[in-house]
Image: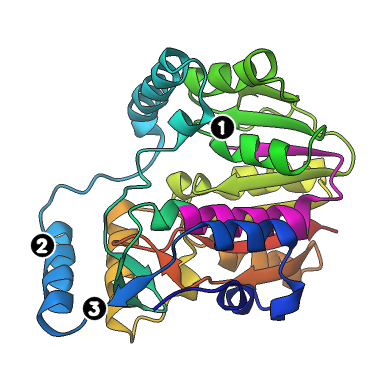
Amino acid sequence: MNLSPEDFASLFGIAGNALPAACRKFVEAADFHYEPLQGVERDRVILGVLRHLDSGKLTMVGPERAGIWESCWSDSLQKFTESGFDPERLVPDFIRPNQPIRLNRDYVIPRNPRFELDFLRVCRSWLFARFLGDAQSVYEFGCGSGFNLIALANQFPGKKLCGLDWSKSSYEMVAMFRSKLGLNISGRHFDFFAPDPQLKLEREAGVLTMCALEQVGARHDSFVQYLLDQRPAICVNMEPLAELYDDNNLVDYLALRFHRERGYLDGFLTLLRELEAKKRIEILETRRLEFGSIYHEGYSYVAWRPI
């Protein structure tokens, strides 16, 4: 089986001819062939997931992991500099090649070892085109290696971008993109748990998080309040959204178990829905892309704006 441009358009909830040219180019350049898992092979993957969940080795997210992320992005910085500043060296290690993946609430085996990364590139291009094209500037919070910012800079040359992270290695690496890659990107420190009110967003700014806000668990109120105070034009959060799973589906149930064992983002979409009911924000779109890694789906998104 193979994912076509029309399949991606369906995932995004649009007609096939409405898929942006940049997305179509990514789809046509990549190999999206896959084999559905059945019988013994599917059971083997499920058993492996269950054993991992029961291993007692899963660690909880939270501020105590700051040292781990500092080490992670320090390694990325070293790879980036030693490669002569090759952006391909910035792909995060959590996007693993040669793994079974989740697709349409089941497990499949991709033919392409870079299936997950290529899928993300298509979805990322779609998000940027749909929601961030009109933003005067874009701030990515929890930017990690900065590889999303480079993609955004390439899609919208000249747009003013800023990458923020609690890791010193992360925002120092992002700050290098201006001198080493010629991109209009700056970097600075930011803590989701204690946002700096002195950090003022520019008017008509866009806000982006991608698989980053997941690390705050249930402690997202301070960040949401910061955004309400700053009043950006648009906020786009591509994160694991537990509210979108169906716990009557086995594959979803396992994802929920993993999500809760790790302490990932908890109640975020529920909070946004409550704020919308109070007329404090407008939710523009919520979408589950029915895609993820072997353990969970990190690529659902919600787009919203303060009122």
Q: In terms of sequence position, does the residue under pointer 1 or pointer 2 come before the other?
A: 2
Separation of residues labelled 3 and 1 (CA atoms): 34 Å
- Circle nearer the viewer, 3 or 2: 3
Q: Is residue 6 above or below residue 260?
A: below
Instruction: Tell me residue 54's x, y (percent).
Output: 12, 60
Question: How many residues crowd around disc 3 within 10 Å: few (fewer than 14), some, or many (20 or more)?
Answer: some
The numbered disc on residue 269 is none
Whether the residues at callouts 3 and 2 have beta carbons within 8 Å, the answer is no
Residue 192, visible in the rendered structure: no
- Which residues fall within the magenta stretch? 118-141
Separation of residues labelled 1 and 2 (CA atoms): 33 Å
Type of amino acid under label 1: Gly
SS state under label 2: helix
Residue found 85% across the figure and 59% down from its top: 307
Q: In terms of sequence position, does the residue under pointer 3 or pointer 2 come before the other?
A: 3
The numbered disc on residue 37 is 3
Drawn side of residue 277 relative to residue 53, left or right: right
Q: Quadrant of residue 22?
A: bottom right
Q: In terms of sequence position, does the residue under pointer 3 or pointer 1 come before the other?
A: 3
Instruction: Tell me residue 260's x, y (percent).
Output: 32, 60
User: Which residue matches tag 1?
Assistant: 146
Type of amino acid under label 2: Arg
User: Which residue matches tag 2?
Assistant: 51
Residue found 74% across the figure and 77% down from its top: 17
